[in-house]
């Protein structure tokens, strides 16, 4: 659970919830609203506004900005206007004018002088510090710290943070991280005092630092009274602290029997960490392990240590080398060396760390200069263009398509993948990097990766009909657009996620013919082989059409379906004697279509159809997992089914018990599908793993207004309305109980927990409602035009302006989607 919460926290801090900037988060409560929220037990941070001075006005601005981050921790932020509706005990009190109050459990929890909550960082950090006051310890002396370490031995590791003062950005980072990891580590905070001398820090230092004290695995074997410690080398921030804690969970020494060049690079979350390789021989195995362990402790937080056993024949490194290392840069090779001592290796990585810190200082200075320039810009479009003005990736690895070379280039290869983009478009530039990554993966294959700059080659992107031969695609009006082009065929449009993996998979699944004509038993075996030998490890869905002859009436619609499924599934066509033999062996009546889902163990057989649309619908139903896991990538396809979502949210499994609990929950949800039968066909029973899909945390919080305990079960996206229903958190999730709850929802006896927000995406401000401005300008001149003079283009512009001149009113606090 703590891992997925951490990833979600980083996503939020990095700007994942941009849409929330368009709605007011600070609420003004009436006296009745305040009392209702208070008695409900919700945690609230409230200011009782009486007289507004310039100082109070500044505070209210910061208070409003703190509402968004605090809502993710279940804290409601708002104010009560005492001049409209006084609240007894607060509005008439003089002290309340300069105090903001935290309420918890139906009563006042703590009051904060406005001098201590003066900006967003101080508000968030102080409120979280107050909420976590029992979990976060504050020490001043070495004796206090030693007592905490003794209490933690064999139980928990300690994250010890030093901040120069409370209410700073660094203090906020500590509190946000402690909120997520508080159940896993003991957090200790210091702001100065004698304990700094023990940690080797000058008391006059203003630089925030963090230490990780390894107490959990050192209960009684320590030579020192204190737990071994590792200092975080990077400046304190939420991101760096999260990465540091993840790195502390890495194995101290990994042992391998492969050559360093064959060892896999570190995977998430250690992908930015160097690797150090030491070599071991059978005769000195224990001594080599001790030496590696010693180095690993000294490099803790800087590099991962790997012990390579030379006894394995897979190790090809020459005997003259006794060490090697690999840096985290992309395509970094293993570098071999002969080291006379561990100090040499330590010096190597210590120097690299110092150089990296110097580079980060230079980058920070450059960013500060950029910020000063950005502050002069008051238009968000200008800001966006300015920020990304130098960010266009290098497209030299791609073939540039033009009016002159388009047809010749497409004719040279069996498959050309073309990206149509605009160089100033933010989405185009972002996706261009992923497109180039795919091109590098496919280098050396028959696939040509190309790009079209539509700012330069407007005729090509507009598919001008005057050019002969005509282009095999319709005019491109949406950017970026990816088309798959084959000689003498119409273009195939890519409509998937704009990411490396999704595009690469689509291209790989699009390479085989669709359908593939299978004429030998070997071809059939290869088609059904898992994994497919030509699909780079992808496990695809497969659809096999079985017909007596090529002239069968069902062959034509099956071929149309196969073209529709190209890029999504492999399709094969089997006819004549081989089809009859296969049908006889598998007890299938011809003609038929066998569907092999990637998640299943065997095929399902469908009757052939003379309607392509009907057959495609049946195939997609057969490919649908009975209990699919929702992800950001597949959510749009599931929403397009138009079914209500019976959606289970489960958290990260911290241990084997948690894994078994989640598996038991999924079994119960499968039971819901089986017991419900036809009655449940109107719903898509599915689940989200918040560890693998941390964005689901935002969805769940948006659905219910706050984060409920996990697991959580909701019913939403009902065709009959926008209501959201929550299965009672106090009721065990059992298949019969869930079915009874669904029945109560259908009967109207269950109360909704919330509603979905509308699909409207209005401009963030009236200034940016360009269509409305265009519609309001020169109405008389547009009315004087005749329909003939106006033309189709003018009619289209007028229609678009009319339809968008008035945006639908949004709920004040709408729920959001992925």
Image (cartoon, helix red, strand yellow):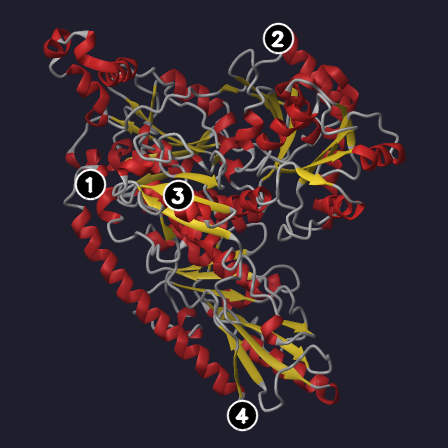
Q: Residues within 10 Å of mark 4 (few under 14, many from 20)?
A: few
Of helix, strand and loop, which one carries label 1?
Answer: helix
Q: Report whether 537 appears left or right of 301.
A: right
Q: Secondary structure at mark 4?
A: loop
In this rendering, would 439 be left or right of 222?
left
For label 3, the residue is 407
- Cα–Cα span, label 4 and label 1: 57 Å
Which is closer to the viewer, label 3 or label 1?
3
Element type at mark 2: loop
Answer with mark 3 or mark 4, whichever residue precedes in sequence. Answer: 4
Inter-mark Cα distance, 2 to 1? 50 Å
- Disc nearer the start of the sequence (3/1): 1
Name the mark on residue 140: none
The quadrant of the image that shows the N terminus is top right
Residue at 63%, 36% in the rendered image? 629
**Circle 2 is placed at which residue position?**
748
Tell whether label 2 touches label 3 (CB within 8 Å).
Answer: no
Q: Residue at x 35, y 54 (%)?
A: 395
The span from disc 3 to disc 1 (Cα, nearest Å) is: 38 Å
Q: Which residue is mark 1?
A: 382
Residue toward you, 114 or 312? 312
Q: Is residue 286 visible to us here?
A: yes
- Per the model, the C-alpha gap separating discs 2 and 4 is 77 Å
Distance from the alpha carbon under mark 3 to that under mark 2 = 61 Å
Inspect this view and state whether residue 684 appears: no
Quarter assignment of residue 680: top right
Query: Percent from the top left, x then y, of residue 2?
Result: 57, 47
Q: Name the secondary structure under disc 3.
A: helix
Relative image position of residue 699 (x, y in whole percent): 50, 32
Closer to the camera: disc 2 or disc 4? Answer: 4
Residue beneath the point at 27% across and 43% down: 424
In this figure, which residue is indicated by the disc labeled 4?
340
């Amino acid at each position: 659970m703590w891992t997925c919460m951490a990833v979600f926290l980083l996503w939020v801090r990095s700007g994942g919830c941009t849409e929330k900037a368009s709605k007011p988060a600070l609420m003004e409560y009436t006296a009745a609203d305040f009392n209702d929220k208070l008695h409900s037990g919700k945690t609230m941070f409230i200011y009782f506004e009486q007289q507004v001075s310039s100082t109070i006005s500044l505070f209210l601005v910061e208070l409003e900005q703190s509402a968004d981050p605090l809502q993710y921790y279940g804290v409601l932020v708002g104010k009560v206007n005492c001049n409209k509706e006084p609240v007894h005990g607060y509005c008439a009190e003089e002290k309340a004018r300069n105090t903001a109050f935290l309420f918890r459990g139906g009563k006042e929890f703590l009051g904060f002088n406005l001098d201590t909550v003066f900006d967003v960082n101080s508000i968030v950090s102080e409120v979280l510090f107050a909420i976590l006051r029992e979990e976060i310890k504050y020490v001043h002396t070495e004796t206090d710290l030693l007592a905490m370490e003794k209490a933690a031995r064999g139980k928990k590791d300690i994250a010890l943070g030093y901040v120069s003062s409370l209410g700073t950005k660094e203090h906020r980072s500590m509190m946000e991280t402690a909120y997520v990891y508080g159940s896993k580590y003991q957090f200790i905070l210091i702001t100065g005092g004698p304990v700094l001398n023990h940690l080797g820090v000058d008391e006059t230092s203003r630089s925030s630092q963090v230490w990780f004290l390894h107490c959990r695995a050192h209960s009684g074997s320590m030579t020192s009274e204190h737990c071994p410690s590792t200092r975080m080398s990077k400046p304190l921030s939420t991101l760096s602290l999260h990465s540091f804690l993840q790195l502390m969970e890495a194995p101290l020494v990994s042992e391998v029997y492969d050559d360093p060049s064959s060892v896999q690079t570190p995977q998430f979350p250690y992908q930015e960490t160097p690797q150090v390789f030491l070599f071991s021989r059978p005769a000195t195995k224990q001594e080599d392990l001790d030496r590696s362990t010693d180095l690993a402790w000294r490099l803790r937080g800087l590099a991962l240590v790997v012990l390579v056993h030379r006894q394995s024949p897979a190790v090809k490194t020459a005997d003259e080398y006794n060490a090697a290392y690999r840096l985290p840069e992309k395509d970094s090779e293993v570098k071999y060396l002969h080291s006379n001592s561990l100090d040499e290796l330590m010096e190597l990585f210590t120097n690299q760390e110092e150089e990296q810190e110097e580079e980060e200082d230079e980058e920070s200075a450059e960013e500060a200069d950029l910020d000063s320039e950005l502050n002069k810009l008051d238009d968000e479009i200008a800001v966006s263009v300015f920020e990304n003005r130098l960010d266009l990736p290098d497209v030299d690895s791609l073939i540039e398509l033009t009016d002159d070379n388009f047809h010749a280039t497409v004719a040279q290869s069996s498959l050309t993948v073309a990206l149509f983009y605009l160089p100033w478009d933010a989405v185009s530039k972002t996706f261009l990097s992923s497109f180039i990554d795919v091109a590098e993966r496919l280098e050396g294959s028959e696939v040509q990766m190309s790009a079209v700059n539509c700012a330069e080659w407007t005729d090509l992107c507009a598919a001008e009909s005057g050019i002969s031969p005509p282009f095999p695609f319709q005019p491109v009006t949406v950017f970026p657009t990816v088309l798959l082009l084959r000689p003498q065929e119409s273009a195939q449009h890519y409509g998937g996620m704009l990411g490396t993996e999704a595009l690469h998979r689509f291209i790989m699944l699009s390479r085989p013919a669709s359908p593939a004509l299978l004429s030998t038993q070997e071809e059939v075996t290869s088609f059904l082989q898992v994994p497919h030998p030509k699909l780079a490890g992808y496990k695809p869905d497969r659809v096999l059409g079985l017909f007596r002859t090529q002239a069968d009436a069902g062959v034509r619609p099956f071929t149309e379906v196969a073209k529709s499924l190209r890029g999504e599934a492999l399709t094969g066509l089997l006819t004549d004697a081989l089809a009859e033999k296969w049908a006889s062996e598998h007890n299938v009546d011809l003609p038929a279509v066998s569907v092999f889902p990637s998640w299943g163990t065997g095929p399902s057989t469908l009757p052939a159809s003379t309607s392509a649309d009907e057959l495609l619908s049946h195939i997609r139903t057969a490919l649908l997992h009975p209990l699919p896991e929702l992800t950001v990538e597949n959510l749009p396809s599931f929403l397009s089914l138009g079914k209500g979502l019976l959606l289970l949210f489960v958290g990260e499994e911290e241990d084997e018990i948690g894994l078994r609990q989640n598996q038991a929950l999924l079994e119960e949800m499968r039971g819901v599908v089986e017991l419900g039968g036809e009655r449940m066909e109107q719903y898509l029973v599915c689940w989200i793993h918040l560890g693998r899909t941390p964005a689901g945390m935002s969805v769940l919080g948006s659905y219910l207004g706050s984060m409920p305990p996990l697991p959580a079960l909701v019913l939403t996206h009902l065709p009959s309305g926008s209501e959201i229903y929550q299965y009672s958190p106090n009721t065990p999730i059992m298949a019969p109980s869930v079915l009874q709850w669904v029945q109560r929802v259908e009967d109207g006896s269950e109360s909704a927990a919330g509603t979905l927000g509308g699909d409207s995406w209005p401009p963030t401000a009236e200034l940016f409602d360009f269509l409305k401005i265009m519609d309001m300008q020169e109405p008389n001149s547009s009315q004087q035009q005749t329909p003939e003079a106006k033309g189709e283009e003018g009619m289209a512009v007028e229609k678009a302006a009319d339809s968008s001149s008035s945006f639908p009113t949004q709920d004040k606090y709408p729920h959001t989607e992925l």
